Amino acid sequence: MNYRDVFGEVLADHHESPRNWGLASDSQVRENGFNPLCGDKVTLGLKFRDGQLESCTFEGEGCSICMASASIMTEMVQGQPLSKVSGLIEGFRAKMQGEDRPDVLPADDSSEDIVALYGIKRFPVRIKCALLPWTTLKKGLETHHA
Ligand code: ZN
């Protein structure tokens, strides 16, 4: 079974060429996430400026879904106001867990990347893999505000 055939070109590409890989040395917050179901580990490096998430880098060790999700997430949230980042996190979580939150949902037409991630819903045991980077980012924002 070929990964490309099962999960599609977009996720395969992010898995093979992760964006924003490598923790920025001047990260202000480093946050670790762990998914015991699959063994996924992710570490995010976050930099903040003027109420925005200036940069979001990551490293990790985990399944292809988790790594692709982290790569897509970093691209979506970088340079965004923190309020919007929180909304994207909540919207993605809600979508993956089947809740109706159109108020905060990353729109289907916002990128083909997010649509590809939504497709992971077809594999319920992998939803936690896709969510891990996002829940880790949520914890990172809380650490920043603490
Ligand atoms: Zn996983």
Image (cartoon, rainbow, N blue to C red):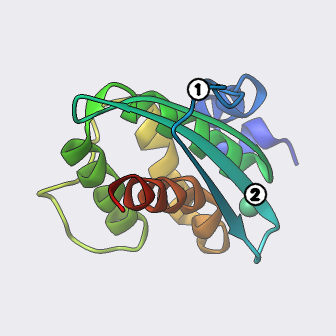
- The answer to whether 69 is drawn above or below residue 18 in the figure is below
Labels 1 and 2: the sequence-earlier one: 1
- Mark 1 or 2: the one toward you: 1
Direction left: furthest residue: 103
Q: Residue 25's image quarter?
A: top right
- The answer to whether 118 is drawn above or below residue 70 in the figure is below
Marks 1/2: CA–CA distance: 21 Å
Q: Where is residue 125 drawn, in percent x and y?
A: 66, 74
Tell me: is circle 1 under 8 Å from ligand 1: no
Q: Where is residue 5 drawn, in percent x and y?
A: 74, 39
Q: Residue 122's image quarter?
A: bottom right
Q: Where is residue 131 drawn, in percent x and y?
A: 53, 61
Q: Which residue is mark 2?
A: 41
Residue 107 can be seen, yes or no: no
Query: Is residue 80 left or right of 21 when viewed as pictured?
Result: left
Q: Quadrant of the C terminus?
A: bottom left
Q: Residues within 10 Å of mark 2 (few under 14, many from 20)?
A: many
Q: Residues within 10 Å of mark 1 (few under 14, many from 20)?
A: few
Q: Residue at x 75, y 36 (%)?
A: 4
Query: Is residue 143 left or right of 35 when viewed as pictured?
Result: left
Q: Residue at x 64, y 40 (%)?
A: 68
Residue type at the position of mark 1: Asp
Q: Which residue is mark 1?
A: 26
Image quadrant, ligand 1:
bottom right
Q: Which mark is residue 6?
A: none
What secondary structure is marked by label 1? loop
Kindly indicate whether the residue at mark 2 contacts the one at mark 1 (C-beta within 8 angstroms). no
- The answer to whether 79 is drawn above or below residue 117 in the figure is above
- The answer to whether 22 is drawn above or below residue 30 in the figure is above
What secondary structure is marked by label 2? strand
